Amino acid sequence: MMSRGWVSLVGAGPGYPDLLTVRAVERLRTADLVLFDALVAPAVVALAGQAQRFCVGKRAGRKSVRQETIIRLMVRAAQRGRRVVRLKCGDPYVLGRGAEEGVALRAAGVPFEVVQGITTAVAAPAGAGIPLTHRGLASGFVVVSGHHDTSYRPILGSLEPGSATVVILMGLSHRRGIATCLLERGWAVDTPAAVVFAAASSRERTWIGTLRALGDTPHADESEDPGTIVIGTVVNLHTVLRDVGMSTSAAEGKG
């Protein structure tokens, strides 16, 4: 057990509270201050019943708290002897700037720990019945940020067509550019593709289509929900592996 005056970089997982780790729940219940991302489920934040709670999340196109301010809040609170939880969607070290915060905390002399979470890159496809690897179909997968073409083009542009399952986080608004990048690289137009919206929540739904149709995913531009893009032959397993027995199972739209 760490002494007072520390920071926990906690992964909130993909959504449902029961997908949190035991340690994550314990840290939330004993925290004095919780700084949470915008997409963390309210039921997860509610586990920190004794703490002050502030949303410091960033959403595309909206005014948000600067990263420097978030770090300053963590450092100041920890130096005052408070138990701080920095609560992030998925895993803190997967496209979540958790490593940047860890470096800053170490430079400030603030004790910190990382509490791993299930990354949405794996959990969202799995919940929709899409395994990222499958014998004979895919022996590996690539996860990239889709928020800008400088993030995804160097990686996707180097992939041999069909050589791995491709997972894109934060890429809904750039899905046409992502599809174009892969098509230019030689990927087949009928390569299976999926978008999992609002993974691990009551609003979860899945669009299934092809790489050619990815840019025309229905209602994606109007949706407030995050979407995880999956591209590769493993998407075809969706119809076999999706859990149709759960009340939270995804509603499917055909592309």
Image (cartoon, rainbow, N blue to C red):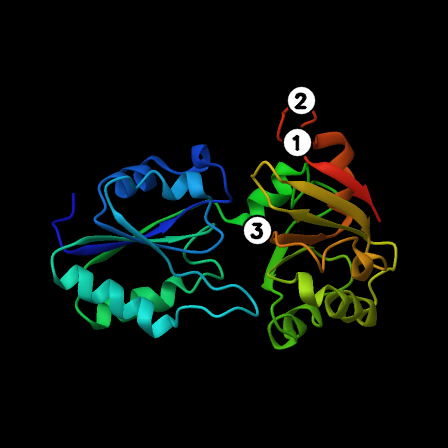
The residue that mark 3 highlights is 121
The residue that mark 2 highlights is 245
Which corner quadrant holds the N terminus? top left
* N-term mark: 3 or 2: 3
Q: Position of residue 179 (x, y in %)?
A: 77, 65
Residue drawn where x is 36% and y is 40% of the image: 46
Say what amino acid the circle numbered 3 marks. Ala
Residue drawn where x is 23% and y is 46% of the image: 31
Q: Which mark is residue 210?
A: none
Q: Nearer the viewer, residue 83 or 57?
A: 57
> Hey, which residue is sitting farthest top in the picture?
245
Secondary element at image label 1: loop
Q: Is residue 180 above or below residue 201?
A: below
The residue that mark 1 highlights is 249
Secondary element at image label 2: loop
Q: Position of residue 245 (x, y in %)?
A: 67, 22
Residue drawn where x is 23% and y is 67% of the image: 106
Q: Nearer the viewer, residue 51 or 253?
A: 51
Residue drawn where x is 78% and y is 33% of the image: 239
Say what amino acid the circle numbered 1 marks. Ser
* Label 2 close to label 1 by CB (< 8 Å): yes
Q: Position of residue 211 (x, y in %)?
A: 81, 58
Say what amino acid the circle numbered 2 marks. Gly
Mark 3 → mark 2, Cα distance in angstroms? 23 Å
Dividing the picture into quadrants, the one containing residue 154 is bottom right
Dividing the picture into quadrants, the one containing residue 36 is bottom left
Task: For label 1, count other residues whose C-alpha is less than 10 Å away and answer few (under 14), some (14-19) or many (20+).
Answer: many
Q: Nearer the viewer, residue 36 or 90?
A: 36
Mark 2 → mark 1, Cα distance in angstroms? 7 Å
Secondary element at image label 3: helix
